[in-house]
Each structure stands twice: as structure tokens, then as C-alpha cells.
Image: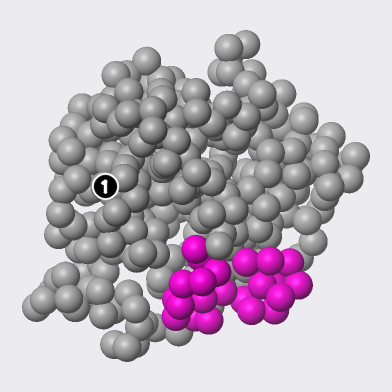
Amino acid sequence: MLLASGHTAEALQGEELEHQFRESDVVVMTWPKCGTTWMQEIVWTMRNNPDLDNPQAMVPTHNRVPFLELDILLNSQNIPPLGEDSELMKAFRYRCPHKDPKDGILMQITEVSPDPRTIKTHLPFSLLNPHLLDTAKVIYVARNPKDVVVSYHHHSRLIKFHDFSSSLDQFVQYFVDDDLVFGPYWMHLKEAWEKREHPNLHFVNYEDLKQNNMVEMRKINEFLGTNLTEEQLQKVAKYTNFSEMKTREETQSDPKKTIVFNTDIVTSSGGFYRKGKAGDWKEHLTPEMEAKIDQWTQQKTKDLGSSFRFSS
């Protein structure tokens, strides 16, 4: 596994994350750059802020929705150790008094977070508690691999955890070689697809959410049992669209930006919220890169069957 200094694929895959889930939990599960933050905000808003009057909504998304395995990335050699004055450490000290951060900052924050919890993970089912689906609900989001590659390349240059500096062409090669953080996308996807009939799993295509937003929002509302009215769903849809989320992110004062973000990349290529488009790959991939990903898709996802599609 490349792009996370000091880590290997085996480090992520060595053992299951034996976190104890609760019946009221909703886990947003994705491979990186498949619409994770968007779905986090949709789920949290539906469950906690359907009338857009919850003051906690002004807190950055990553503080309301714990990133379950972030402790692994916080050990990266590419960022300095968290100081006591950092946003995350302050949150830890407030929520977990008398606890030792060496036992996992995010894991312990997740454990003490009040119900109903919305939790984010990029880990596949095989690395999580085997009883996850028997206990909690999971929303899985899949995305066209061409857009995933382009977005993940930007992300890996932007985020200091990864500290990637090579070309998109090299990144495409790592992707088709299954040599990126969080392991092969196709295996991650296959594990979720095989469980798609489980009543506690809702499978979403990013492209469908972009093209038929209200249709997909109604499906999510039904799956979560939030019973929102059409007016509330319209509010949530507008509040969680890309431009609204990007504007909020840009106006929030967040110290993590200078600690975690490569400011040169922010200036030259954009920040965490870049475009959020379906089909943006057409502006970035050469025909040779596209052919590599097409071949990968045909070989690796053929077992998913004709009913599965990445694009609408």
C-alpha cells in the first residue's frame, strides 16, 4: 500500500476493528472519494437537523461524524503529533476526561458519542465487527472508478497523511495494481454488493444521487425510518448540495486545514471540496489512462452482474 508514510496494507488488514456498534448507529461506508462527506451530511441532517435549526450543524462534519479508523492515519510520519491545543485533542479531553489518547483518540470519541451516532468508515466489511449488519444500519456508496481515481489523486496530494506528489498517470497505475490506501476498490465493493439484500444495508450509486437526488433522498429516508415530510426532504437536499457544503466549509475557521492540508495544493488545485461532479474524469484522464481503468473495471467487477452499474 502506498501514499501513507509509515503504513502498509497489511497494517490495515491485520485484524478486525472490534468496535461495538449500537442499534441506533448508522455507518456510512465507502472507499475513499465515493461521496463519503456528502452522505455523512445527508444522514446526520436527516436524523438530527431536518428543520435546519440544530445549532450543532455549525460544527464541522468531521466533529459530528467520527471517522472510525482515523487513529491509524494520525500515526503518519507526514504530520506532527497532535498538540494539546489542537482541535481534535481539545475535543478528546472534553469528551474523554481521564482517558489516554494513546489508546485511540477517535475510537474513544466514537465510544462516548451520544445516540444516535452517525459513523464514517473506509474499511470494508471484512475488517469490521462481523455482527455490524445484525446490529446497526449501513449506507454504502459506490462511484465510477474513473471519477474516484481523479478525486483520490487530488485528495492524496492535498492531505499530508498521504503526501503524494507524482503524476495522475502514476496514480492510475497504482489504482489498477490495487496498491492504494484501504486496499483494492473492487474487493471493498464486492463485499458490500454481496450483502446488498440485507435489510440493514442500503446500497447507493453516487451518480444516481447526483442525477435523481430527490428520488434517492426518499429511499434513504425510508431506509433510515426518519419519516421526513417532502418539505423537510427538500430542505435537507438543498442544505446538503455541493455548493452549500462548499460555502460552509470555506467560511468555517478550522485549524486542521493548516495541519492536515498541503496549502500549495489548495492554492493551485482547490481544497477538500473541489468539484463534486459526475464525469469530471473526462477533463483529466488521457485515452491511455481511461483504457487502463476500463480494463480494470471489466476484469475486476464482472462478478457483480449486469444489474450493477457505476454510472447512470
Q: Quadrant of the C terminus?
A: top right
Q: Secondary structure at mark 1?
A: helix
Residue at horizontal 41 percent and vertical 48 percent from the top: 41
Residue at horizontal 90 percent and vertical 39 percent from the top: 287
Of 267 and 30, nearer the camera is 267
Coordinates of residue 181 in the picture (x, y in percent) = 54, 54
Coordinates of residue 214 in the picture (x, y in percent) = 50, 28
124 vs 144, left or right, is: left
Q: Is residue 203 above or below residue 247?
A: above
Res 123 quadrant in image: top left
Q: Is residue 117 above or below residue 186?
A: below
Magenta stretch?
A: 248-271
Coordinates of residue 146 in the picture (x, y in percent) = 72, 40
Of 255 and 71, nearer the camera is 255
Of 15 and 147, nearer the camera is 147
Q: Is residue 90 magenta?
A: no
Q: Residues within 10 Å of mark 1 (few under 14, many from 20)?
A: some
Residue that extends furthest to the top in the rendered view of this protein:
306
Residue at horizontal 32 percent and vertical 23 percent from the top: 222
Res 29 quadrant in image: top left
What is the basis of the colouring in this image?
one colour
